[in-house]
Image: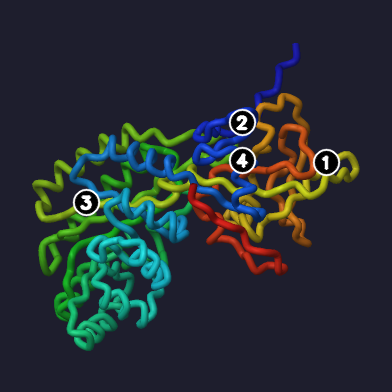
Amino acid sequence: MITPPHPLPIHAPMTQFAIDNGQLLIGGIPLTQLAARVGQMPFYAYDRALLQARVAELRAILPASIKLHYAMKANPMPALVGWMAGLVDGIDVASAGELKVALDAGAKPKEISFAGPGKRRGELRQSVAAGVLINLESFREVNELAAISQELELPARVAVRVNPDFELKSSGMKMGGGPKQFGVDAEQVPQLLAEIARAGLQFEGFHLFPGSQNLKAESICEAQQKSYALALRLAASTPSPVRFLNLGGGFGIPYFPGEQRLDLTLIGESLTQIAARAAVDMPEAELVIELGRFLVGEAGIYVTQIVDRKISRGQTYLVVDGGLNHHLSASGNFGQVIRKNYPVAIGNRMNTGVKECVSVVGPLCTPLDLLADRMELPVSQTGDFVVIFQSGAYGASASPHGFLGHPAPIEILV
């Protein structure tokens, strides 16, 4: 008796976009019509309704006392940031360039926070002048801000970004625990708080962000509980009551075969417990959850067009007009150790039953320009549209547009 092989893992179903007459609908518009409207290939498209639905989904499980912030490093497209600013409670930025976009989008300075391990003096000066909250990540920043506050005669609003003494387990990217360039080691925070007091800065609270892209609710809950306990312990050394506590995010979305969507129920229960404790332990503190990828990642697609079909020694290649220069993450060159395929479709042949094994490659002169490696896709022809799902975060802005001189992609909000 021969034991049948285990079935290969498959991608989580990409059901967030409707299908009509074999075409993917983005913002209710058929893909071929949308491509004609854009007028240039390739392009990214982000769906307003899906962004709004994701925020509503989170609001339903979050206690009312916890604020929701958008980490705009996930997708800084100005129109998208403007839309998100009207849906969330605040914006988190990571540069002066992002700060400008957030302010232009109408975000309230009081609800903007700025994090990053290498803030230049000019960026710190702009942040103080704008009145945003600066997440301190070094002792150097305390001295810089003291001088800037005196020069501008404005108070520098600060929180301490803490590098915790634990990691967010099962994270795609660990940003806390052990030696890190992010934040100040938890054991050094009391000393930093004393420096903040001596410098006369306006202390407001703590920022903890131990990791990102986590699909295990239990790990996220454990990190949130540990983050809260650490903040409470550090609150004993603060120069004034804690008024702001950012517990980070880390919520992931499924990219690769075998991954499942995050279950929010357990996270909501954990945050409800923390909010109840904080109301007693730190009654002046506003609790914040900071999310980027989870808010926008599933609402975006990358669309590129087939310009050639080639067969090389039995392998079929679909050559498209965009590649790693537009979507570095999908090519596997943005942090993947072992390359895996994003979910991919032929966007104008969604109901086609006949499939073939193909590889989708871009136009660049490098074997790294691979968007799909030996995937089962509907039989397609030159002119058809290859769609890469899960592209609303770390897509266009995380890619080397200038590489080999090809045109940059268009971005639209539908």
Give above or below for 390 relative to 175: above
Q: Is residue 169 visible?
A: no
Residue holding disc 1: 316
How far separated are the C-alphas under marks 3 and 1?
52 Å
Give above or below for 103 relative to 261: below
Q: Nearer the viewer, mark 3 or mark 1?
A: 1
* Crowd class of label 4 (few under 14; some 14 to 19; many from 20; radius 10 Å): many
Residue holding disc 2: 9
Q: Nearer the viewer, mark 3 or mark 2?
A: 3
Identified by mark 2, the residue type is: Pro
Residue holding disc 3: 287
How far separated are the C-alphas under marks 4 and 2?
28 Å
Identified by mark 1, the residue type is: Thr
Identified by mark 4, the residue type is: Leu
Image point 71% across, 69% down: which residue?
Answer: 405
Residue holding disc 4: 31
- Circles 4 and 1: CB atoms closer than 8 Å: no
Determine the secondary structure under disc 2.
loop
Query: Which of the pair 317/260 is nearer the observer?
Result: 317
The image shows residue 211 at horizontal and vertical percentages of 41, 53
Image point 26% across, 52% down: which residue?
Answer: 288
